[in-house]
Amino acid sequence: MTNEVLHAKLKENFGFEKFRPNQETIINTVLSGQDTLAIMPTGGGKSICFQLPALILPGITIVISPLIALMKDQVDSLKTNGISACYINSSQSAEEQQFYIDNLKSNNFKLVYIAPESLSYLDVIFNELTISLIAIDEAHCISSWGHDFRPAYTNLGYLKNRFPSTPILALTATADKATRSDITKQLNLKNPKTFVASFDRKNLSLEVRPALDRVKQIIDFIEKKPNESGIIYCLSRKTTEELAEKLSKNGIQAKAYHAGLDNETRAKTQDQFINDDCQVVCATIAFGMGIDKSNVRWVIHYNLPKNIEGYYQEIGRAGRDGLPAETIMFESYADVIQLQKFASEGLNSDVQLAKLDRMKQYADAVSCRRKILLSYFGELVTENCGNCDICKNPPTFFDGTILAQKALSAITRLQESEPLAVIVDFLRGSRNAYIYEKNYQTLKTYGIGADISWYDWNQYLIQLINLGYCEIAFHQHNKILLTSFAKKVLFEGEKVKLTTVVKKVIDKNEIKQEKAKAIKNSLFETLRKLRYEIAKEEEVPAYVIFSDAALRQMELLRPMNEDEFLAVEGVGKVKLEKYGSEFINAIIQFHRNKSVIKKEKKDSTYKKTLELFENGISVEEIAERRNISQTTVISHLAKLYVDGYNLDLSQFVSEEEIEKIRNAQLKLENPNALKPYFDYFEEKISYDKIRFGLAFIERKNQSQQV
């Protein structure tokens, strides 16, 4: 297949001018009939790698996909692009399933999406179909080494035996070397060609925060983004519900999502989020796996993820359209012990515990986070990213030996029997009831750190835990215990390096400004509302019509005819025909309205100057009252005079001066600027007089023409 044909198909059917990295090579490999394993990050464009070949190959492409929502979204998107596709799953009636099966036998569809558990629906007609390609999405689910083991995937190995000459394309967003090898083995792929795209999602900012007062931190964060969708991942079902309720009480549209909810509630929540009717979903990690929503602007991990693969895939659900997106992860040690328990009870516990350790090391890092993520997937980079919290605010180290000795001594005096909060109170000399009930105020080191804030002490203790000098006994009511390394600091003179605590201060005025900025009447907001209305009419997610990235490009390019609209990335032939006129008209109308508003504002400011002048206020005082320059006031008065207002200009310019200006105008051939006049008069007539004189001449010329 020639590059020209592939590029033409890409633009005509999907609206894109060029392929993303690896897409074209993968497509050509698939078209050659070779089995292929493609590792591409979320948002990297995996779907095009089987959707475009499906249009070129003669028969049907079967897409095995894990979740019903993903199938529906992909099929809706394909139909919007004029591509025939369907899905078959257990949510449909027997009549619906039979309708699609009959149409598949008649070759009326190019793609059919189906869950691995539902493949039996096609068993009876396999021999009647011409199957040109089998695509297996989320292929890591087949591997016991992967982070989302799914039993139904383990049966897919029979497909290669049944269709030995049909190429299989396995795709996943995250898979380390062990998982890649296992996918190939489990699927019986024959000499597959493996492609590993760059995992570098430059548009995602990365940040890790201590889990102190995280609900308030989350509310402050969301309040600055009133029109932006986001996902908050939580470790437990209970947390999703509690957090959603707290957000709702603070005026944020938030819903909980977890496996314990009934199917109807889960489906409704997912639909509301996909269709921009719900801003925030607080969910367990299964949520989002089957969502192709491109305009998720942020992802928050309320709890520490269990491994880097899962974390990377979950944050990858933000910014799939390529626009900037934010990710925040909160870290607490209660999460670590719970995750350790889960990992130790599961399959391959040693591997899962090792992966959890890597996740914790990432959270505790003091170097570029993106470099750590990329190196985990075997991609080595030398430059820091500049878009993570470490790069933006590099930690400052200092000699914290004395602080460490004070903290470790306090733990010793409290006989290693108290949790972190009590140790901080003890160090600061707090006079609360618990301290006095235990008579801790009588111990030798009580109040030894009174000069350091509660927040800072809390952070220093967490650093000491990270460094291995003490640990949390979660099974003993979170007591802080000393490790063998603590002796080196207390008795052997070992030095301790700590990092300076930087506390993020939330500026409420900044939040108000961000909210005002977000809801201002921009062209993007106008197009976003139009997209929402069309999506409602067609009963599809808004991003299926156009992505945020496409709307941003429309805002930038301001296309006002079909050729200009077709140049927008994401606009193909079908979408131009379906939506072009509405969006072009909206852009043209926005321009007209802006022009009217601009004129109204201009008229308003001129009239304020006129009102003051007619009340006998001097030019100097008008400028002071209105906080504008005197030159601006003079230009207002000159324009008002030209427009027909009866103003006495004699106080500013004499008849003799006006005549001189008229003669200069003839000799200078009516220049547009004032400086030629000023130079002509050798600076003896001021700019203000020249401006007023020209206004007098222009008005007189208008009256003579009438």
Image (cartoon, helix red, strand yellow):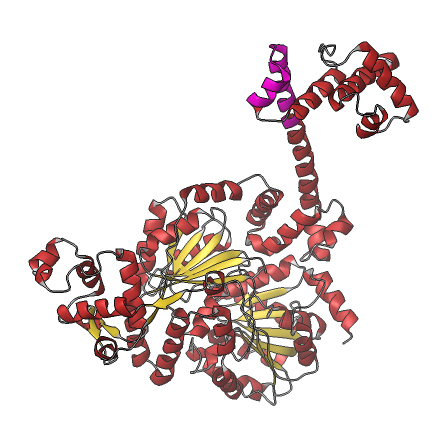
Q: Is residue 126 magenta?
A: no
Q: In the image, is 256 to the left or to the right of 70?
A: left
The majority secondary structure of the magenta stretch comes to helix
> At x 46% / y 66%, what residue is drawn?
314
Q: In the image, is 462 to the left or to the right of 588?
A: left
Q: In the image, is 356 to the left or to the right of 629?
A: left
Q: Position of residue 155 (x, y in %)?
A: 47, 83
Vertical arrangement, residue 29 with respect to residue 544, above or below = below
Query: Which of the pair 388/186 is nearer the observer?
Result: 388
Q: How many marks?
A: 0
Dividing the picture into quadrants, the one containing residue 406 is bottom left
Q: Is residue 611 magenta?
A: yes
> At x 18% / y 67%, what residue is drawn?
410
Query: Which of the pair 461/663 is nearer the observer?
Result: 663
> At x 67% / y 44%, what residue is drawn?
582
Residues drawn in magenta: 601-625
Dividing the picture into quadrants, the one containing residue 149 is bottom left
Q: Position of residue 693 (x, y in %)?
A: 79, 17
Query: Which of the pair 421/324 is nearer the observer?
Result: 421
Query: Which of the pair 477/421 is nearer the observer?
Result: 421
Vertical arrangement, residue 450 with respect to residue 146, above or below = above
Does residue 549 appear anywhere in the picture?
Answer: yes
Does residue 129 appear anywhere in the picture?
Answer: no
Q: Which quarter of the rendered picture does the C terminus lie within? A: top right
Q: Position of residue 350 (x, y in %)?
A: 35, 85
Q: Which quarter of the rendered picture does the N terminus lie within? A: bottom right
Q: In the image, is 155 to the left or to the right of 431?
A: right
Vertical arrangement, residue 470 with respect to residue 322, above or below = below
Dividing the picture into quadrants, the one containing residue 35 is bottom right
Q: Position of residue 68 (x, y in %)?
A: 49, 65
